[in-house]
Amino acid sequence: MKPKKFVEKTFIKLYERSFGENFDLPAMTDYGSDKIFMYSDVAKEIAKLHILFEECRINKGDKISIIGKNSSRWAIAHIATVSYGAVIVPILHDFNSNDINHIVNHSDSVLLFVTDKIWDHLNEDGMPQIKGAISLTDFRLLHQRIGENLNDSLLSLDEKFAKKYPEGFYPIHIKYSDQPDDDIVVLNYTSGTTGFSKGVMITGSNLSGNMEYAHVAIRLKKGDRMLSFLPLAHTYGAAFDFLYALTEGVFTTYLGKTPAPKILLKALEEVKPEVIISVPLIFEKIYKKMIIPILNKKAISLALNVPLLDTRIYAQFKKRLLSALGGKARLVIIGGAPFNSEVEDFLLKIKFPVSVGYGMTECAPLISFTGEYSEFVPHSCGKVLNCMDVRIDSENPYNIAGEIQTKGQNVMAGYYKNQSATDAVFTDDGWLRTGDLGTIDKDNNIFIRGRSKSVILGASGQNIYPEEIEAKLNNLPFVMESLVIEKNNRLIALVYPDYDAVDQTGVSHEDLPLLMEENKATLNKMVASYEKIAEIQLYPNEFEKTPKKSIKRYLYGNI
């Protein structure tokens, strides 16, 4: 039986209900900290920030920027902003200081929540319109504009809160903005893969569409645990680790660290989440470090060819992998970037509870997803959501790739103060151009081939999808990541080597070019004749990536 649907009329009212219903349950904590915020504590902190906003003359619709790694106070500041009726502007913590200043100014933000470390590198004189900056460590003042009384207001917040609620603070006191769902709630700047970011205007309705679908498809339950390690400033992590989790009475631990496999696996083991939201890169690294070395053992390789014995071995792989993830995961959701087909095939072969979704910031973020992993179609990105429509710009959308275009409840209102970019991303008849190429089947499952701007035209007119070649190359020995480009009518693969694997096996760095020649020969046997690589060039550093861990291809086209 499917759970009942949310009954609230607006996105913001979801939190008014949830904080009241889950008042005495744990809501959030920071990894490595003993401090736990109950839902009642979150509601109280939000009430205090609303008092601060009123005293600082923050108006409904004003923009408030927030910059920092995932943390409980990041989440509280975000919900306090949108539930007040203001617009939150999440900024990725790894943006450089010039870009942060630009986004704060371009968004017309009047207040800034920021971690102390990031604030030390910002130029407050370059953000003259903000009333002040507040620390995400403890909500103390970092900076205030001349003539503002932000510091006095912050220091007297507890006193004013006690005066406003003299008999105590209870669920009955939780009352949030009644603004309509068509209003802008989030202004999300994403670096993307084609240049400088644009401000995506996300409405309450866009987020409601995602929350409603998650409620039915992901089905988190009151008291479930989540580990939030994807950046909350990006819509994918924010939508499900944070915004959706808070509507269901979930207890979320915010990692607050770079999710390197060693750190992440330790945190997963301790938190033991029921649902895990991830990008492909993380599971591809786990597969490469934990699974491939075992699969390459001769005894295991032989045993996997024996009927019945292979089933038992795959069951042990599944048990071991689930145990490494905390032992309680009933669903792992992969999204944000293309998933390596070899890794996906292995996970499906061992009956691992994995499903792949597809979306973009402009859809806040979901376009397609299959919640029941047993119904997930291999190599697809799930089924189009019932609140969305998708069409393929192709004469034969079932077999010939074309641009994926979408419309529906989740589609953004446009780009902030950028009508030309908004006009360019929509077709004349109102469909959002995703920039991705793919096909669709008769059951509305989407299959992605690559980005339209990264397709390489072969000598005989064939479409070459570099992402598909890279997925094969990345699974070969001593390859950490790769990028296939076209130069002088030849396909060149740039490879950043897996130096840890090189050192562990005792291979000399001087031998890497020879090993890559072997990889090239192996790869060229796996691809079509027009996809063969002419040369592998070693690249000295990891490739620059977007928040979704997609390589910024446009930076490497002229190498």
Image (cartoon, helix red, strand yellow):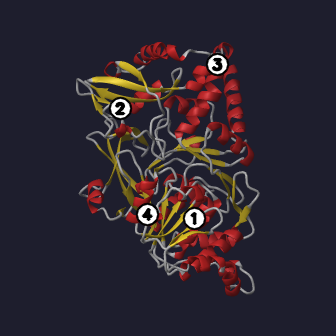
In the rendering, which numbered label is found on residue 5?
A: 1
Please say if 236 is above or below 157: above
Rendering coords of residue 444 (x, y %): 42, 46
Residue type of the residue flagged with mark 3: Leu
Cα distance in 3D space between marks 1 and 3: 45 Å
Cα distance in 3D space between marks 2 and 4: 37 Å
Residue type of the residue flagged with mark 1: Lys
Rendering coords of residue 505 (x, y %): 62, 17
Q: Are marks 4 and 3 in contact (CB under 8 Å)?
A: no
Q: Are marks 4 and 1 in contact (CB under 8 Å)?
A: no
In the rendering, which numbered label is found on residue 342?
A: none
Q: Kindly identify which residue carries mark 3.
A: 304
Answer yes or no: is residue 520 visible: yes
Camera-side mark, 4 or 3: 4
Task: State left or right for residue 92 relative to residue 458.
Answer: right
Q: Earlier in the sequence, mark 4 or mark 1?
A: 1
SS under mark 4: helix
Q: Kindly identify which residue carries mark 4.
A: 104
Cα distance in 3D space between marks 4 and 3: 56 Å
Residue toward you, 323 or 144 = 144
Answer yes or no: is residue 409 visible: no
Q: Earlier in the sequence, mark 2 or mark 4?
A: 4
Please say if 437 is above or below 23: above
Camera-side mark, 4 or 1: 4
Q: Earlier in the sequence, mark 1 or mark 3?
A: 1
SS under mark 1: loop
Residue type of the residue flagged with mark 4: Val
Task: State left or right for residue 377 relative to residue 537.
Answer: right
Rendering coords of residue 127 (x, y %): 43, 66
Q: Kindly identify which residue carries mark 2.
A: 465
Residue at 67%, 33% (x, y): give it. Answer: 318
Q: Residues within 10 Å of mark 4 (few under 14, many from 20)?
A: many
